Image (cartoon, coloured by chain):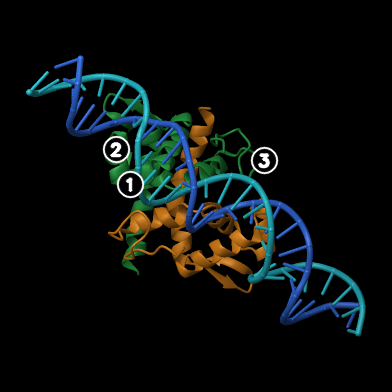
Chain colours: A orange, B green, C blue, D cyan
Amino acid sequence: MSTPRPGKRVRGSQTGRPIMAAFDLLGRRWALRVLWELGEAPSTFRELRGRCDDVSPTVLNTRLRELREARLIEKTDQGYALTEPGRSLGRALRPLTRWAEDWGGAN
Amino acid sequence: MSTPRPGKRVRGSQTGRPIMAAFDLLGRRWALRVLWELGEAPSTFRELRGRCDDVSPTVLNTRLRELREARLIEKTDQGYALTEPGRSLGRALRPLTRWAEDWGGAN
DNA sequence: GAGGGGCGCTATGATTTCCGTAGCATGGAG
DNA sequence: CTCCATGCTACGGAAATCATAGCGCCCCTC
């Protein structure tokens, strides 16, 4: 499966509307979680895997490749880290965290 | 696969932290998209399927059940619609839309 | 009351994705 | 050279997702 990008056809949308590409990319297993964990701290492959409840390395590597192709993360001396767009996405996801806490409170 | 709920163990987290439950629930195929489309307008099953690029009815129904169990959507006379928590989630996702547009602009 | 059409949804079998485990290749330290 | 940690790939099995067909229901019309 190819990496979704805005302007490209993606699963579920011929229009290439950016939000649809984002839904496709972020709706893959562990994608949101990986971004979240890298937002907390840059990590090496094995560290990251530990933070993500020992996700299988196959999937982790696939997600990392996709997120790298989407330019949301990059490899640095410290391991994997968010790029500026990646950090920006992290900020955009903050309201989601707050929402989740409310949601959790109501359950 | 059971529906993730805050306070419950979910894939990738024994802690039941709400954000992790959210990541699990929203990181399933079509979940974000379905919420998005229902935010645009309540829809019947078949309508919704059309809006979601004719996703297979099996998956659509599974997502609808999960989202209903999570109390984010409900069945009304008009078809499926967001609940109040669902609308609140929609608002929490708005920054993501704006981010996606920027992201799209840069690609 | 017999047909027709739309609806929500299920059945089924193929395909894709994800998973768990093992282990290879590389590189640095001793 | 040996040891050890790291990034990552191989592989076989399990689970999620897919496309397509069509059932059962209700309403409408004839």
**Figure check: C6 above or below D24:** below
| Left or right: residue B54 compared with residue C28 | left
| Left or right: residue A15 compared with residue A104 | left
- Disc assigned to residue B14: 3
Mark 2 burial class by Cα count in 10 Å: few <14, some 14-19, many 20+? few
Q: Earlier in the sequence, mark 2 or mark 3?
A: 3
> Mark 2 sits on what residue?
B46
> Mark 1 sits on what residue?
B52
Q: Which of pointers 2 and 3 indicates the residue nearer the eye?
A: 2
Residue ID at (30%, 40%)? B48
- Quarter of the image for residue A77 reads bottom right
Whether discs 3 and 1 lie on one chain: the answer is yes
Q: Chain of mark 2?
A: B
Secondary structure state at the residue bearing disc 3:
loop
Q: Earlier in the sequence, mark 1 or mark 2?
A: 2
Separation of marks 2 and 3 at Cα, in angstroms? 37 Å
Circle 2: residue type:
Arg
Secondary structure state at the residue bearing disc 2:
helix
Seen from the viewer's position, the closer of residues A54 and B29 is B29
Residue ID at (45%, 48%)? B29
Residue ID at (50%, 27%)? A106
